[in-house]
Image (cartoon, helix red, strand yellow):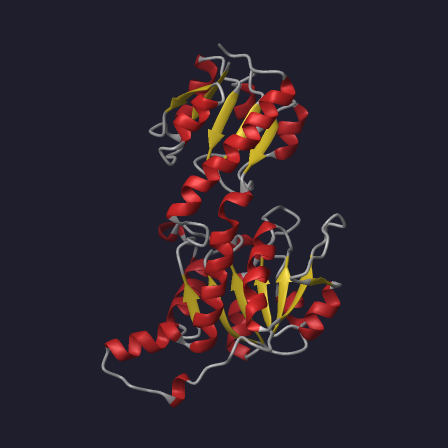
């Protein structure tokens, strides 16, 4: 039997799902990040289930030498040192399939809101202001949408926008990524030449830090609308502010920020945040793109399915 430690709050369906595949779980979401190494050292767990409470590092893995897998209940794995995992033979499991539909729907909503000034118009009407002409918007239909990254999230967004009559162009640096009926894979320069909208769907990594920067935005041939439902750090927010100020960016919808712990913003980060929250062509939401009641449970279903396949391939579990 596999024995895992769960350190983050999870949908209650997870425990019976794990039991159904022969995994005994210690559910301890009250553990602080500082307490997790001690908990791993105290029992011979062969599995660790996490969300985003802590970073999985070489040092942490050393405290759990029996670990065979780390299961990330979600899509992003930027809090996990994959090289450190590989070095000690620990398998990483995650569940981007679990919230891709939620992200695809949310990104569609952001785009409609941005182009049609829904949030701004709502705020005005609530103040007794009735401005029709000032809120005349743009239709999504006929726009060319550039997708930076064409994995689970990018594809989910592309599937939904197909009904609007958009031209969908995707760029992904991974040569293994294949085109489908919903978007054409093109070189980055072609996407920059043709796109009216840029939507970010790349994971965060050291290589992707500020991938979208001043030079990147300067490569677009026309002003654009920008959406980010990926990770805040892939976007240079100084470049975004400059683009909004000089008109190279018509507007932006950000579900993620460069620093989402708003009480800890540095001076420059605070200045950029003040500008963004004061701009009526900017939408800000608190990292909720993949955050639905349905995805909360679906992530568990995907993760447990992958864990069952892993344990079957590995020949069962230790850690009794």
266 relative to 203 in the view: left or right: left
Up the image or down, 261 lies above or below 4; here it is below
Q: Position of residue 202 (x, y in %)?
A: 61, 53
Q: Nearer the viewer, residue 41 or 97?
A: 97
Q: Nearer the viewer, residue 77 or 145?
A: 145
Give the residue at x 71% y 74%: 193
| Quadrant assignment, res 11 | top left
- Can residue 270 be spotted in the picture? yes
Up the image or down, 130 lies above or below 34; here it is below
Q: Position of residue 194 (x, y in %)?
A: 69, 74
Q: Position of residue 181 (x, y in %)?
A: 68, 60
Give the residue at x 59% y 34%: 81
185 relative to 265 in the view: left or right: right
- Residue at the limit of the structure toward the top, as seen here: 320
Up the image or down, 243 lies above or below 66; here it is below
- Residue at the limit of the structure toward the bottom, as seen here: 133
Q: Nearer the viewer, residue 295 or 90?
A: 295
Q: Position of residue 242 (x, y in %)?
A: 54, 72
| Quadrant assignment, res 88 | top right
Up the image or down, 90 lies above or below 236; here it is above
- Can residue 34 be spotted in the picture? no
- Total number of numbered discs in the rendering: 0
Give the residue at x 50% y 52%: 101
Give the residue at x 47% y 32%: 50
| Quadrant assignment, res 212 | bottom right
């Amino acid at each position: 039997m596999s024995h895992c430690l769960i350190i983050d709050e999870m949908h209650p369906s997870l425990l019976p799902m794990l039991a159904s595949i022969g995994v005994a779980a210690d559910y301890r979401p009250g553990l602080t990040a500082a307490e997790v190494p001690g908990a791993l050292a105290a029992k011979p767990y062969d599995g660790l289930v996490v969300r985003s409470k802590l970073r999985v590092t070489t040092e942490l893995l050393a405290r759990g030498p029996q670990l065979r897998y780390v299961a990330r209940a979600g899509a992003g794995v930027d809090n996990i040192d994959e090289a450190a995992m590989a070095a000690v033979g620990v398998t990483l499991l995650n569940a981007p399939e679990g919230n891709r539909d939620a992200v695809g729907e949310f990104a569609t909503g952001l785009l409609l809101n941005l182009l049609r000034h829904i949030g701004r118009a709502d705020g005005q009407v609530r103040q007794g202001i009735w401005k029709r002409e000032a809120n005349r918007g743009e239709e999504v239909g006929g726009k060319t949408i550039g997708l930076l990254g064409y994995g689970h999230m990018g594809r989910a967004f592309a599937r939904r926008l197909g009904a609007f009559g958009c031209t969908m162009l995707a760029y992904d640096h991974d040569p293994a990524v294949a085109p489908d009926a919903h978007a054409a894979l093109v070189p980055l320069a072609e996407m920059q030449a043709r796109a009216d909208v840029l939507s970010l769907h790349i994971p965060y990594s050291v290589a992707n830090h500020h991938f979208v920067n001043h030079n990147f935005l300067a490569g677009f041939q026309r002003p654009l609308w920008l959406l980010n439902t990926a990770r805040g750090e892939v976007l240079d927010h100084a470049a975004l502010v400059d683009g909004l100020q000089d008109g190279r960016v018509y507007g932006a919808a950000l579900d993620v920020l460069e620093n989402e712990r708003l009480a800890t913003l540095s001076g420059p980060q605070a200045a950029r945040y003040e500008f963004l929250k004061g701009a009526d062509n900017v939408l800000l939401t608190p990292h909720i793109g993949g955050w639905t009641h349905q995805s909360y449970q679906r992530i568990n279903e995907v993760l447990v399915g992958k864990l069952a396949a892993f344990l079957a391939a590995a020949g069962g579990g230790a850690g009794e």
